[in-house]
Amino acid sequence: MRQYPGQPGTLHGADERVSVEQMIEAITINEAYQLLCDDRLGSISVGKEADLVVLGDDITQCEPEHIADAPVLGTMIGGEWVYVR
């Protein structure tokens, strides 16, 4: 967002903002690629380590300042559910 939530007057570097989809890619598949482990991390596919979080809201459809409000419905680490709501 490059601004404090709810404070548009604090916007810094508007031309450097990215979309929610771009940010998700940056912290998943792109990060795994940079760490040379995209063969086992960064996306959901057969044979990869299943570390993921299931959210109760579509964070690509809500206002960015409300992403943190999305409820966590489940967390999986290494293919095992460690939290299920």
Image (cartoon, rainbow, N blue to C red):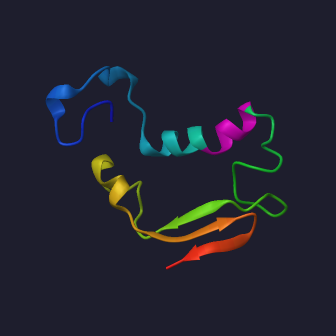
Report the magenta residues as a range.
28-34
In the image, residue 5 sits, relative to residue 79, either above or below, namely: above
In the image, residue 48 sits, relative to residue 2, either above or below, namely: below
Q: Looking at this rendering, what residue extends furthest in the front direction?
A: 82
Name which residue lies at 42% across and 39% down: 19
Name which residue lies at 53% across and 45% down: 24
* Count of numbered badges drawn on the protein: 0
Queried whether the magenta region covers residue 14, the answer comes back as no
The answer to whether 31 appears left or right of 10 in the picture is: right
Name which residue lies at 32% across and 20% down: 13
In this orientation, which residue lies closer to the viewer: 59 or 10? 10
**Residue 18 picture quarter:** top left
In the image, residue 24 sits, relative to residue 9, either above or below, namely: below
Q: Position of residue 61 (x, y in %)?
A: 36, 57
In the image, residue 13 sits, relative to residue 69, either above or below, namely: above
In this orientation, which residue lies closer to the viewer: 5 or 82? 82
Name which residue lies at 58% across and 41% down: 27
Q: Quadrant of the N terminus?
A: top left
The answer to whether 59 appears left or right of 32 in the picture is: left
Q: Position of residue 31 (x, y in %)?
A: 66, 37
The answer to whether 38 appears left or right of 31 in the picture is: right
In this orientation, which residue lies closer to the viewer: 35 or 62? 35
Q: Position of residue 17 (x, y in %)?
A: 38, 29
Q: Looking at this rendering, what residue extends furthest in the bottom direction?
A: 85
Q: Main secondary structure of the magenta part?
A: helix
**Residue 11 picture quarter:** top left
Q: Position of residue 74 (x, y in %)?
A: 55, 72
